[in-house]
Image (spheres, rainbow, N blue to C red):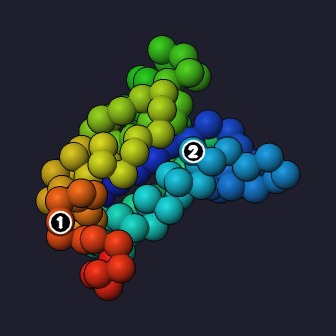
Amino acid sequence: MKKLEIFDPAMCCSTGVCGVEVDPVLVAFNADLQWLAEQGVEVSRHNLSQEPQTFAANPSVLKELEAGMERLPLTLVDGKVVATGAYLSRAQLVQKLGLAPVAAPFPVQVGSGCCKPGSGCC
């Protein structure tokens, strides 16, 4: 089983999805992490303001923080840093974890003759 760890900067709550002005990037990222967990990935997320001891106990994380706080968030896969300074998209996470690509929804080809208005196929 793949293990994904996220080391977040200090936030008011564990996901950053709180308060009156919620960052849509954090909302999407949280949903992506939940989806990955449903796919069998072991996901753990650490917030600097709530778990500083977890940051201090990880040599890879400490090394990144020595370069500056702007390195957060950190993304680790199986203990190795794979991304710094940004939240990855679902497609990027899938790629970093070595999972099968997410299938795109069925493409609808407008004007191809397969789905004419009123045909009842779409």
Quadrant assignment for the C terminus: bottom left
Label 2 sits on what residue type? Val
- The answer to whether residue 17 is above or below residue 75 is below
Label 1 sits on what residue type? Gly
- Whether residue 75 is visible to the viewer of this picture, yes or no, is yes
Q: In which quarter of the image is residue 112?
A: bottom left
Q: Quadrant of residue 121?
A: bottom left
Question: Residue drawn 50% across and 62% down?
Answer: 31
- The answer to whether residue 110 is above or below residue 9 is below
Question: Residue drawn 56% across and 21% down?
Answer: 70
The percent position of residue 28, horizontal first and vertical second, equals: 53, 54
Question: Residue drawn 27% across and 58% down?
Answer: 110
The answer to whether the residues at label 1 and label 2 have Cβ atoms under 8 Å apart is: no
Give the numbered dot on residue 113: 1
- Left or right of 36 on screen, residue 96: left
Quadrant assignment for the N terminus: bottom left
- Left or right of 28 on screen, residue 9: right
Q: Which of marks 1 and 2 is in front?
A: 1
Which label's residue is closer to the chain start, 1 or 2? 2
Check disc 2 and report the residue beneath it: 25
Secondary structure, mark 2, is: helix
Question: Residue drawn 17% across and 65% down?
Answer: 113
The percent position of residue 46, horizontal first and vertical second, equals: 55, 50
- Whether residue 2 is visible to the viewer of this picture, yes or no, is no
- The answer to whether residue 29 is above or below residue 62 is below
The percent position of residue 53, horizontal first and vertical second, equals: 58, 45
